[in-house]
Amino acid sequence: MAARETDIAQLILYEPAILVGDHRDGAPLAPRLRGHLDAGDREAVIEAFFRETSTSGDPSQWPTAERAPLAETVVRESAVVGSYELPDSLTVDAPTLLLAGSESPAYLRDGIRAIDDAMSAATFVELSDVGHVGVWRAPEKVGAAVRSFLPDR
């Protein structure tokens, strides 16, 4: 899938799901999730997704039932994530801010660092004591990083 050319004034990315290095090893997640979906077990899709991707090891904390309606989306997006390969270099003319949480899963932190390595002029900020859902759990830290990046208006 190729990106279209468009004018972007600034770009901010918070831990896009990019699998790099050892995180690409092993059986792909999407076919396993598809098996649960094909069997009609939407909650099993969500449970397997959280088990494979979350840093929260406590299944009682997983919103499995409330996320079950998203099972098709989870399978589809997992297939895209599993098939995408980050190029060695990325050319983005717009000023770019790359955000990561220090407590996020390793595959997300490694992915955003690989994006930083592939871009020549990005600004990388790691938010301490913040996880993947920093936008919801630490909006003040995310907001401060974004405000410091954006030009004065």
Image: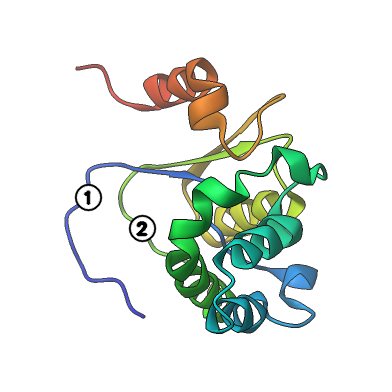
Provide the secondary structure element on which disc 1 rests: loop
Check disc 2 and report the residue beneath it.
92
Q: Quadrant of the C terminus?
A: top left
**SS class, disc 2:** loop
Percent x, y of residue 43: 60, 61
Q: Which of 80 and 2 is in front in this view?
A: 80
Picture residue at 65% right of the left edge, 62% below the top: 49
The residue shown at (20%, 68%) is 5
Name the residue located 18 percent from the left edge and 61 percent from the top edge.
6
Residue 137 vertical placement versus 21 (above, below): above
Q: In this view, does 59 lie to the left or right of 49?
A: right
In space, the residues marked 1 and 2 are separated at their CA atoms by: 9 Å
Other-residue count near label 1 (Cα within 10 Å), few / some / many at <14 / 14–19 / ≥20: few
User: Counting residues from the N terminus, which is met first, the one under dot 1 or under dot 2?
Assistant: 1
Toward the viewer: 75 or 36? 36
Q: Residue 32's x, y, as percent?
A: 67, 80
Direction front: furthest residue: 40
